[in-house]
Amino acid sequence: MTGQVTDALRLAGTARVGDLVLEVDLTVDPGETVALLGPNGAGKTSLLRVLTGLLPLSGGRLDLAGDLVDQPGSGTFVEPHRRSVGWVPQDRLLFPHLTVRQNIGFSPRATAERVTALLDALGIAGLADRRPSACSGGQAQRVALARAVAAEPAVLLLDEPSTALDIDSQHLIDGLLADGGARATVLVTHDPVEAATVADRLVILEDGRVTHSGSPTDVRTRPRTRYAASLAGLNTLPAVADGYTAMTVGGALVVLGEPATGPVHLVVPPSAVALHRTIPDGSPRNVWRATVAELQPALDRIRVVLDGPLPLVAEVTPGAVEVLELEPGSRVWAAVKATEITVHPA
Amino acid sequence: MRAPRPVLAVATVAVVFLTLPVIGLAQRTPWSSLGDLLGRQSVLQPLVLSLTVSVAAALVIVVLGTPLAWTLARVDIPGRRIIRALVLLPMVLPPVVGGTALLFALGRRGLVGQWLDRWFGLTLPFTTAGAVVAAVFVALPFYVIAVEGALESGSDELEQMAGTLGAGPLQVLRRITLPRLLPAMGAGVALAWARALGEFGATITFAGNLPGRTQTLPLATFLALESDPEEAIALSLVMLTVSLAVLIPMRDRWLPGRRPGR
């Protein structure tokens, strides 16, 4: 013990799965939610299996909640059932011969009161005595999540939790995730909108290695790899909505195409951000003053990273860059039609 | 799928061949005096004994066979293939040979039997317990094969899931593996029980042919064939009925990996 704040999870190790070599450095703080993004076959699911103990490390070490659980060098290996980890695998793996209540209460560490509270919180109390086969996809996902958190794990691992999820389930699950207390969450996803809206930090995993770790804004505005650049495709802006307008965290007023209230995330495709040298007139009602921070080539387009009240990324043609004489430091007007903005509840 | 005619023709011959003996039995049955025959002590006594022996054997088989099947399927023990071959040997061994071998192992002068006799005063040959031992010996492999076939090699995903939720290996076995194995255990126990019920060779060699103690239905039938053929038919009908009563509810569940009702 060094007297520092204990990490919920600290991994610096390697593991092998077939041809893939995972070589990962990853630290997650208590209460932090990390979204793990990466192309198919990058090792996201394998990384979760390393954390559960189902895939032992071949080198390095893994600490969970301050305890060393896997270190091949010293012969240390803590079995999965002795780790404080909750796992929601992509195919959920509900126990078909047990009822919903028995599934959620499966862990020896889950109390009956906790199970009942979770059944209520996730709106599945009515299914308590049914078998998983009688649940819809969204309901089954809620059961799997409730089962994973029933034992109050220090680390929660979610593998593609939103795949084929209905809106109600999504909201309930987001609520449960936001209410995790000291629990750390690692969320595997390939939905950049989900990643940016739920996670405190994005970790990009490519070919078994972490290629980028940073805030959603950092990854969006300074993608380090081609994959990250493709993810960064969408601008995701936290804001508070009130009817047809929303105030962003940066203090910009945005006119919306659809009404909303409360905390939201505004999603703007870079192709919908138009750049002008002089203030435009006409239909776009959202116009902000911005400074060009950076120009990035992206295939046949140029990504223009903007500073200003709204940290947007615009995607324009090389021709437009020439005509507008864009270079870092250029002052421009950025315009977005209200109808191009989609609103996601935060 | 449309079957080619020659295949259908041969399959029909096979079905006729298998059902003909049953028809022959029914045709020779003295239906009018059947009630009287079935009430005889010489029919009832072997029936009760056979049920006792086969059910006791089935219980022993579940207790011994389930851990054995699990170990063969899951544990990476050296020489596993040889051990499996030894376990399955009684399936292919002529039962008379099995009975003889049991006599030399567990008989009063046998390898282990002499110590059982000397230390515990336990004598197996020519006792009902001996008949159970003979039945277990020949029927255990049928159960082991059915259950081992249903266990995947290595722990499956649901068992791993249970582990991450904090269940230790024994809890995983009790709460996940065994409940999901129940259908295969049911099929295995039905197969083994049927085999135990029909056991003849090992029983008569090891346990003898003592009415009320080791004379089970097959033994009584064989003897009655000499002295009283009508009683032999009645005994055969009893066994046929009991076997069908197990076979019919099983439907297709004999075959591992196949869903019933197809």
Image (cartoon, grey):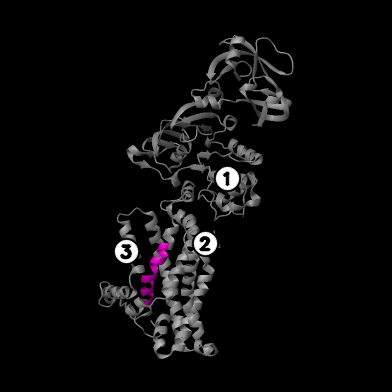
Query: In terms of image quadrants, where is residue A23?
Result: top left
Judging by the rendered image, the residue that carries numbered circle 2 is B3
State the CA–CA distance, disc 2 to disc 1: 52 Å
Mark 2: few/some/many CA within 10 Å (<14, 14-19, 20+): few
**Subunit of label 2:** B
Q: Which mark is residue A242?
A: none
Q: Of tags 3 and 2, which is closer to the observer?
A: 2
Count neighbours of disc 1 (C-alpha within 10 A) and say few if under 14, some if 14 to 19, many if 20 or more.
many
Q: Position of residue A88 (x, y in %)?
A: 53, 43
Q: Residue B86 falls in which quadrant of the image?
A: bottom left
The residue beneath circle 3 is B86
Q: Is B121 drawn above or below residue A120 in the view shown? A: below
Query: Mark 3 and mark 2: span between their CA atoms?
Result: 40 Å
In the picture, the quarter occupied by the N terminus of chain B is: bottom right
What's under tag 2, amino acid-wise? Ala
Q: Amino acid at mark 1?
A: Ala
Q: Which mark is residue A146?
A: 1
Name the one closer to the observer, A122 or B111.
B111
Q: Position of residue B128 (x, y in %)?
A: 38, 79
Q: Position of residue A318 (x, y in %)?
A: 57, 15
In screen coordinates, is A72 left or right of A185?
A: left
Q: Residues within 10 Å of mark 3 (few under 14, many from 20)?
A: few
Q: Which residue is rendered at x = 33% and y = 73% of the image?
A: B94
- Does residue A160 appear in the picture of this structure? yes
Picture layout, residue A96 above or below residue A264: below
Q: Amino acid at mark 3?
A: Leu
Residue at x-position 46% and y-position 79%: B21
Specify the segment rendered in magenta: B131-145
